[in-house]
Amino acid sequence: MNTYASFREFQSFPLIHTFNMLVQKLSWIILLLFLCQHGIEAAVICEGGIGILSCEYTSGTINIIKATYGRADRVTCAFWIPYYHTANTRCRRTVTNTVSYRCHGRKSCYLPAYNTIFGDPCVGTVKYLDLSYTCRP
């Protein structure tokens, strides 16, 4: 009697997918904690939503480090979204210049995450704006 499971059976075990998602989420949390300790703010704005970037409580103004629009994972901004609208995870466009134009040098700014502003890098996929910035003196 063979008690060893094949690698394929191991990968199909339901808890493996859950474990991988947990590790990915924990990695993001650790990264965000690291960035916040170094004065770097991070934000995610779901498609169709509006975010507010702010340096109101510091003596600085907004300095955009990096911004992308699209989808790189299946869990961000995916609450109540059907599977097929989050399946394409290789869909991102760098939009740092666009975000900088709207927010750089201001104390705060409203930032909508709309296809009309950033384009639609993957039609049929629900996207999000992922960015990082600092409050520069």
Image: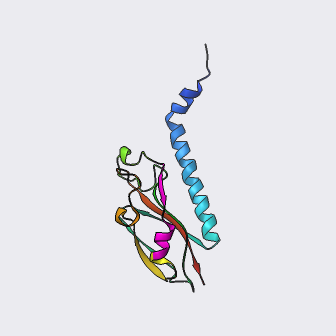
For the point 49% across and 52% down, which residue is it?
Answer: 72
For the point 61% across and 16% down, which residue is it?
Answer: 2
| Residue 122, percent from left and from top | 40, 52
| Residue 66, percent from left and from top | 55, 66
The N terminus appears in which quarter of the rendering? top right
| Residue 90, percent from left and from top | 48, 49
Above or below — where is 1 with respect to 91? above
For the point 38% across and 44% down, which residue is it?
Answer: 83
Range covered by the magenta-colored residues: 89-101
Above or below — where is 61 with respect to 131? below
Above or below — where is 82 with respect to 92? above
Between 35 and 18, which is closer to the camera in this rendering? 35
Q: Is residue 21 magenta?
A: no
Between 96 and 88, which is closer to the camera in this rendering? 96
For the point 61% across and 64% down, which residue is it?
Answer: 33
Q: Is residue 137 left or right of residue 15?
A: right
The C terminus appears in which quarter of the rendering? bottom right
Q: Is residue 97 magenta?
A: yes
Above or below — where is 51 with respect to 91? below
